[in-house]
């Protein structure tokens, strides 16, 4: 199946929207339906305190490959500059994202994500695993944005589509470069990278764009924008605009066996945050960690973000790279999966999905050069 066709990936179970009567704009307090009791599972590091946040890495830096390796091992995340994506395009995407979420709920629900679909408006899929609602809304775009955009703006959907299409084109290019850099940073050589053909096929990554909206919240300590999770992708390239909210679970660099803490990733103008996802965790045999992260809300600012999920082409199975399995661990720790298979598991098991594909020592050789075509 071509990587860009509509809905190549399976959906999670869907809870499409908040209770009918709930309206973020008029809420003066956080209702019980949105109150989270367990937000302090780990301490939250003071923004200026230890541990410091994931590094900012310039992709054009001569040592970028090594810097990426260290960041993916230590944090499973880094901030990226020198990526070449024009600031104007980021501004346009942010403006279109705000325009979308400012529509009334009635209009947005015209493009509601259907139970069997990936694309459309609704709650973050992870919501189906929790009893409480998150303080956010989302809009997912897999393939062409036109059908859903037409439902939102019947006479003026082109401006949204033009921006999203240009953003997707530019980000796919960047995703290919990033994947190449990550494979090199894992110590693989060009000739090890047998990616269903020559390395230029890396541009065929499957991608999904997911827009998040976190309205201002009257009691930010009682609500969560997006609950703690790891992404399923190889990696996610997140644009978080200028408003604080993203936190990653990390440990101080000078005390790697110390306690885990929620660490704020402060917005850096023009930078992306790159999060290692579960499929890269599998590919690297656990050397690059898929990072647990969450989004918190604030009292005054409407925060939006755009997460660009990058995974393998639909027909490719990801398994630990032989060369890396031999290195330290001694064997491949995970069985091979396609992105679609993995998303189905995540939709059933959520945070236990990665654990569920762990193989025991007796299970034999489950490694491949990089990825297998099935
Ligand atoms: C490709 C995808 C990754 C994602 C599920 C999805 O089909 C589209 C939305 C993605 C997202 C965004 C918010 C967090 C997340 C866990 C979720 O609930 O929906 C991720 C999913 C993921 O990475 O598994
Ligand atoms: O908005 C954010 O900072 C995080 C978004 C995110 O984690 C996601 O969309 O998967
Ligand atoms: Fe995420």
Image: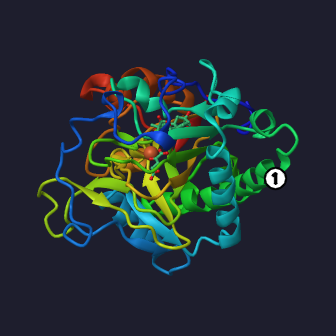
Q: Report x, y in % for residue 92.
A: 70, 62
Does 325 sit above or below residue 346?
below
Position of 23 compared to 120: left or right? left
Q: Which residue is more in the foreground, 353 or 186?
A: 353
Does 48 sit above or below residue 40?
below
* Crowd band around label 1 with a 10 angstrom C-alpha radius: few (<14), some (14–19), many (20+): few
Say how the picture is coloured: rainbow
- Residue 90's quadrant in the figure? bottom right
Q: Is residue 7 visible?
A: no
Element under label 1? helix
Residue at horizontal 27%, vertical 26%?
A: 360
Does 291 sit above or below residue 148?
below
Q: Report x, y in % for residue 291.
A: 35, 49
In which quadrant will I find the C terminus? top right
Q: Report x, y in % for residue 296.
A: 36, 50
Position of 2 compared to 337: left or right? right
Position of 126 compared to 161: left or right? left
Q: Report x, y in % for residue 97.
A: 64, 51
Q: Is residue 71 visible?
A: yes
In which quadrant will I find the N terminus? top right
Residue at horizontal 67%, vertical 59%?
A: 95
Question: Label 1: which residue?
Answer: 159
Residue that sits furthest to the bottom in the current view:
62
- Number of numbered discs: 1
């Amino acid at each position: 199946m071509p990587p860009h066709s509509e809905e190549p990936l399976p959906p999670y179970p869907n809870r499409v929207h908040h209770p009918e009567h709930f309206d973020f704009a008029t809420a003066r307090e956080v209702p019980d339906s949105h109150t989270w009791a367990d937000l302090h599972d780990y301490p939250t590091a003071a923004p200026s305190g230890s541990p410091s946040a994931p590094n900012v890495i310039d992709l054009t830096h001569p040592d970028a490959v090594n810097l990426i390796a260290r960041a993916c091992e230590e944090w499973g995340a880094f901030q990226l500059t020198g990526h070449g994506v024009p600031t104007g395009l980021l501004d346009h995407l942010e403006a279109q994202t705000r325009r979308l979420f400012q529509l009334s709920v009635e209009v947005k629900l015209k493009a509601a994500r259907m139970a069997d679909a990936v694309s459309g408006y609704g709650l973050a899929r992870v919501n189906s695993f929790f009893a409480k609602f998150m303080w956010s809304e989302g809009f997912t775009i897999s393939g062409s944005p036109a059908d859903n955009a037409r439902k939102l703006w019947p006479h003026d959907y082109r401006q949204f589509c033009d921006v999203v299409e240009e953003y997707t084109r530019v980000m796919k290019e960047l995703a290919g470069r990033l994947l190449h850099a990550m494979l090199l940073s894992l110590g693989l050589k060009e000739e090890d990278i047998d990616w269903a053909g020559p390395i230029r096929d890396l541009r065929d990554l499957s991608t999904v764009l997911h827009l998040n909206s976190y309205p201002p919240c009257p009691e930010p300590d009682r609500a969560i924008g997006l609950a703690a999770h790891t992404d399923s992708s190889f990696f996610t390239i997140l644009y978080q605009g200028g408003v604080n909210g993203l936190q990653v679970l990390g440990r101080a660099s000078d005390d790697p066996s110390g306690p885990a803490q929620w660490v704020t990733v402060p917005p850096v103008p023009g930078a992306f945050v790159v999060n290692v996802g579960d499929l890269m965790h599998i590919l690297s045999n656990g050397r690059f960690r898929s990072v647990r992260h969450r989004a918190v809300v604030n009292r005054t600012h409407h925060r939006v973000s755009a997460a660009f999920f990058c995974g393998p082409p639909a027909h490719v199975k990801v398994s630990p790279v032989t060369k890396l399995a031999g290195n330290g661990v001694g064997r491949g720790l995970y069985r091979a999966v396609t992105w679609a298979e993995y998303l189905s598991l995540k939709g059933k098991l959520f945070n236990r999905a990665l654990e569920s594909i762990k193989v025991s020592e007796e299970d034999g050789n489950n490694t491949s050069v990089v990825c297998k075509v099935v």
